């Protein structure tokens, strides 16, 4: 279980004018006062997460469990639904031959009366990667920078919670920095990346590149792709959770891959939770397993963030925190 270590003391809801001035995003923000320093920090509300019951879906709850589990343990789960079957110790799992692993999976199918074609996978705990306490202090800075750059700050919050949280590390495809930007993408969106300087390592500059990418490319591309299917997003529709999750898929997998998936496989008739759930079960071209999981991880991390804020608040007499 994630512990807050008493870092939050007061939470205010519905702030209209923030310390750095009024913005069009104010209605989406929470202001929090940190214990000890009295510093005021800001987070973005995601009411749809609970109003539309995304918090009850098995996929984000599975990944939340994975995020909180240590790397020496694993979960045997149904790949299609992320239903948890059993827990294993990694040291014991690694001692098994491939045939033994297949036999174990079959024993689980028999035990739970599953179809013989049910795909069962083992997923390792990732609490060593998802170090939310370390990234927590930087979220407010990311939110403020995205507001400064006229970009929905929800994306700063979500990306910081799932991309190398608390670390400065390369991904397996070469993305770097708190917002995990590829070299070419970073250069295309205003950052200097060469053998002498890599601005992806600088938090503020990385936030600039990420916000510019989302504002000028990911959001317009999401709208363009949806327009192919007669789905129009305008005004406050941009703040709906399902649309934000689609934008995150474009941020992670690229517009071309998401376009190919929707045109050739998903073929949506409308937006909403059902549309995103279909993406979770669809693959096409380079849109594979990690791409499917991306918005599930975002939802899981938002549930963790809500707890980080809410746990301390619920222990206070005069707290009126709402999602």
Image (spheres, grey):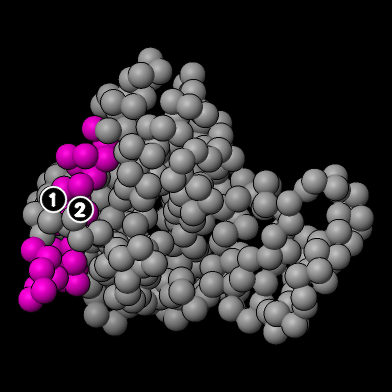
The residue lying at 57 percent from left, 59 percent from top is 63
Q: CA distance from mark 2 to mark 1?
A: 5 Å
The residue lying at 84 percent from left, 66 percent from top is 104
Residue underneath mark 1: 188
Question: Quadrant where the N terminus lies?
Answer: bottom right
Magenta span: predominant SS is helix
Q: Is residue 232 visible?
A: no
Q: How many numbered circles does the render carry? A: 2
Q: Position of residue 56 (x, y in %)?
A: 62, 47
**Which element carries disc 2, helix, strand or loop?**
helix
Q: Which mark is residue 205?
A: none
Q: Position of residue 152 (x, y in %)?
A: 24, 45
| Disc 2: CA contacts within 10 A as few (<14), some (14-19) or many (>=20) | some
Query: Tags 2 and 1 in contact by the CB under 8 Å rule?
Result: yes
Q: Position of residue 156 (x, y in %)?
A: 28, 55
Location of residue 313 (image quadrant): bottom left
Q: Is residue 213 magenta?
A: yes
**Which element carries disc 1, helix, strand or loop?**
helix
Q: Is residue 197 visible?
A: yes
| Disc 1: CA contacts within 10 A as few (<14), some (14-19) or many (>=20) | few
In the shown orientation, is residue 78 left or right of residue 319? right
Which range of residues does the magenta coloring cover? 192-220
Is residue 321 shown above or below 122? Answer: above
Residue underneath mark 2: 185
Location of residue 115 (image quadrant): top right
């Amino acid at each position: 279980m994630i512990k807050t270590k008493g870092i939050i003391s007061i939470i205010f809801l519905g702030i209209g004018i923030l310390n750095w001035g009024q913005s069009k995003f104010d209605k989406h923000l929470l202001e929090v006062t940190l214990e000890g320093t009295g510093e005021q920090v800001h987070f973005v509300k995601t009411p749809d997460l609970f109003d539309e019951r995304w918090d009850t879906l098995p996929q984000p709850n599975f990944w939340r469990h994975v995020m909180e589990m240590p790397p020496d343990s694993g979960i045997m789960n149904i790949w299609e639904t992320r239903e948890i079957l059993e827990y294993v110790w990694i040291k014991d799992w690694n001692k098994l031959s491939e045939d033994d692993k297949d036999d174990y999976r079959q024993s689980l199918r028999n035990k739970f009366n599953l179809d013989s074609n049910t795909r069962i996978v083992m997923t390792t705990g990732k609490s060593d990667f998802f170090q939310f306490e370390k990234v927590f202090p930087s979220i407010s800075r990311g939110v403020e920078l995205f507001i400064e750059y006229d970009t929905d700050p929800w994306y700063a919050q979500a990306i910081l919670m799932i991309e190398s949280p608390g670390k400065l590390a390369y991904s397996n495809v070469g993305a770097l920095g708190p917002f995990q930007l590829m070299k070419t993408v970073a250069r295309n969106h205003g950052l200097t990346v060469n053998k002498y300087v890599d601005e992806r390592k600088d938090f503020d500059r990385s936030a600039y590149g990420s916000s510019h990418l989302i504002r000028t490319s990911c959001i317009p591309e999401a709208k363009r792709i949806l327009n192919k299917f007669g789905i129009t997003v305008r005004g406050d529709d941009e703040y709906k959770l399902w649309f934000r999750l689609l934008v995150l898929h474009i941020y992670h997998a690229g517009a071309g891959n998401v376009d190919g998936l929707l045109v050739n496989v998903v073929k949506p008739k409308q937006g909403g939770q059902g549309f995103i759930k279909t993406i979770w079960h669809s693959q096409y071209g380079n849109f594979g397993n990690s791409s499917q999981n991306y918005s599930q991880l975002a939802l899981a991390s938002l549930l963790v963030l809500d707890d980080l804020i809410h746990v301390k608040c619920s222990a206070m007499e005069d707290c009126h925190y709402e999602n």
